[in-house]
Amino acid sequence: MEQAIRTRTAYTARPITSSSGRFVRLGTASMLSQPDGPFINFARLNLSKYASKPNISKHLFEYAYYHDNDIRQALDIAAQATQSCHFEDWWWKFQLGKCYYRFGMYRDAEKQFKSAIKQQDMIDSYLWMGKVYIGLDQPLAALDMYKQGLEKFPGEIFLMTHIARIYEGLNDLDVAVKYYREVLSHEAIDVEAIACIAAHHFYSDQPEVALRYYRRLLQMGVCNSELYNNLGLCCFYSQQHDMAVMCFERALSLATDETLPDVWYNIAHLALGIGDKSFAIQCLRLALVANNDHAESYNNLGVIEGTKGNIDQAKAFFVAASNLAQHLFEPHFNQALLAEKRPWGSSPTCPPLNPALVLCSLV
């Protein structure tokens, strides 16, 4: 290596060592990476000098924003670059809005995004404006912004997907499915749209239709625990019990720490469906071993104990489930049934209780 470095080239009389040293001296010391230090040391940079150079400032901003995650430094670069270009570059206004959004300054971000849209209509600007309004808890304003973007960019799947997500969050599932279907009409391999339409059909008591969508995801190459879990549920409620068992076995083999409680919980549903309460209790307890805060498992354990006549123990499980997940209506409903059907001094009879059901999300 030393001999190759000392070798003179045919283009110059200087050896390679002297020419490389000359190039090093031309660069600034702050831009040189140290063996144990950062690639770029922003503390030693003259940002006002580099912000006025468009071919360098944009790369510096992206390095600070995406690599170092130093939003304050990125904001400083974007502010000085915006001043150097006399506020005429929409790209820098868009980056300023992103920095303000990361700091939680939603109104300042809104001003920057609106100014960027006035100069240049871009899809990303409409998407980030929608995120700002969602951060301000204004979903209707976000919908208006996304629809304005669709007027400028018809058929844009990202805008339609965000509209569908907002409608889904507003519990308007019919309109959400309409937009997801429109997404599939433009891009037939969109995993999120297929999975959401399948979940909608499953909860609409159409497991056979949902099974077709999940099989499509399987044909596309999606292979994870959530998909096999949902396939198992669809097969079970479509009376395909042999396929349901195989899908749940596959889901267990692919499960992670996050999905394992839901898989065991849904296997317990299969056990309840075939009348094996002892196996269902084992599955629910395994779900609680994987996640001690799994409220649905507590609720279903209470249902099983209630059918056995253990009213006090069932009530304890319902109370635990309602404390862990107050958004679930099943534990409260079951507690109300116990309170109504078992007044003081009556016999310990249990009413038909309401179990919960969990369908894993693929997105």
Image: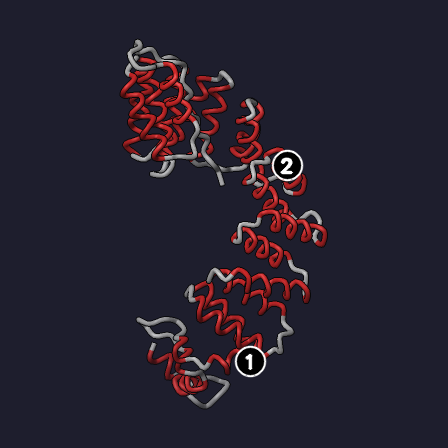
Residue 94 lies left or right of residue 264; in this view the side is right
From this viewpoint, is residue 89 visible? yes
Identify the residue at image location x=36%, y=71%: 38
Q: Compare residues 316 and 218 and report the one nearer the observer.
A: 316
| Residue at screen point 30% across, 13% down | 309
**Residue occupying the point 62% across, 74% down:** 87
Mark in the foreground, 1 or 2 = 2
As displayed, is residue 128 above or below residue 278? below
Q: Is residue 86 above or below residue 269?
A: below
The amino acid type, in three-letter code, at marker 1 is Ser
Q: Which quadrant: the N terminus?
A: bottom left
Give the left or right position of residue 144, taking residue 216 as reference: right
Locate residue 3, reporting x and y percent. Answer: 34, 80
Q: Which mark is residue 52?
A: 1
The residue beneath circle 2 is: 175
Residue 276 can be seen in this image: no
Q: Name the one closer to the observer, 341 or 93.
A: 341
Q: Amino acid at mark 2?
A: Val
Residue 307 coordinates in the image, percent (x, y): 34, 14
Q: Nearer the viewer, residue 130 or 11?
A: 130
Residue 152 falls left or right of residue 217: right
